Amino acid sequence: MTFAAGDVVVLKSGGIAMTVIEVEDEEAVCLWTGEDGDLFRESIPMIALLAAHALDEDEDNAEEESKEESEEEDENEEAEAKEKATAA
């Protein structure tokens, strides 16, 4: 994946969001602030980075799948309750 200046990225292994400020060959120069507000700048191999919005989409998809599974379970429980009531 390639990035451009202004993209927000994170390490594939997790961590804080970083802003790409420059791209050099196969590395992205990134800026981020630490917990104490210190500004950091580092060149990071692009292979180690993901677009930050990709993680947000993954989380949204996981939440949606969980919601759908819960709805299916509720529907199954309702159907079972109707069957029991009809059989009684």
Image (cartoon, helix red, strand yellow):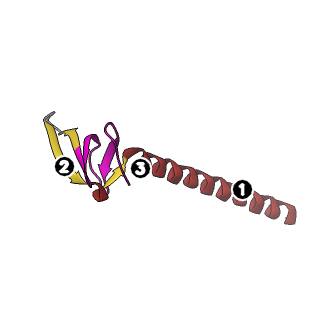
Q: Which residue lies furthest to the top in this view?
A: 37
Q: Where is residue 19 in the image (x, y as percent from the top left)?
A: 28, 39
Q: Which of marks 1 and 3 is in front?
A: 3
**Closer-to-camera residue (87/68):** 68
Q: What residue is shown at x 35% (from left), y 52% (from top)?
A: 50
Dividing the picture into quadrants, the one containing residue 47 is bottom left
Task: Please give the name of the residue rendered at 25% of the width and 41% of the height, measured from the top-left corner.
Answer: 22
Which residue type carries mark 1?
Glu
- Name the mark nearer the viewer: 1 or 2: 2
Label 2 or label 3, whichever lies nearer to me, is 2
Q: Where's residue 80, x and y in %?
A: 75, 63
The tag earlier along the polypeptide, 1 or 3, is 3
Q: Distance between the residues labelled 2 and 3?
A: 21 Å
Give the CA distance from mark 1 to mark 3: 30 Å
Mark sitting on residue 55: 3
Q: What element carries label 1?
A: helix
- As drawn, the residue found furthest toward the front would be 25
Type of amino acid at the residue the image marks with label 3: Leu
- The amino acid at mark 2 is Ser
Q: In which quarter of the image is residue 82?
A: bottom right
| Mark closest to the chain's N terminus, 2 or 3 | 2
**First-in-chain label (1 vs 2):** 2
Residue bearing mark 1: 75
Q: Residue furthest bottom?
A: 87
Residue named by callout 2: 43
Determine the CA span between mark 1 and mark 2.
Answer: 51 Å
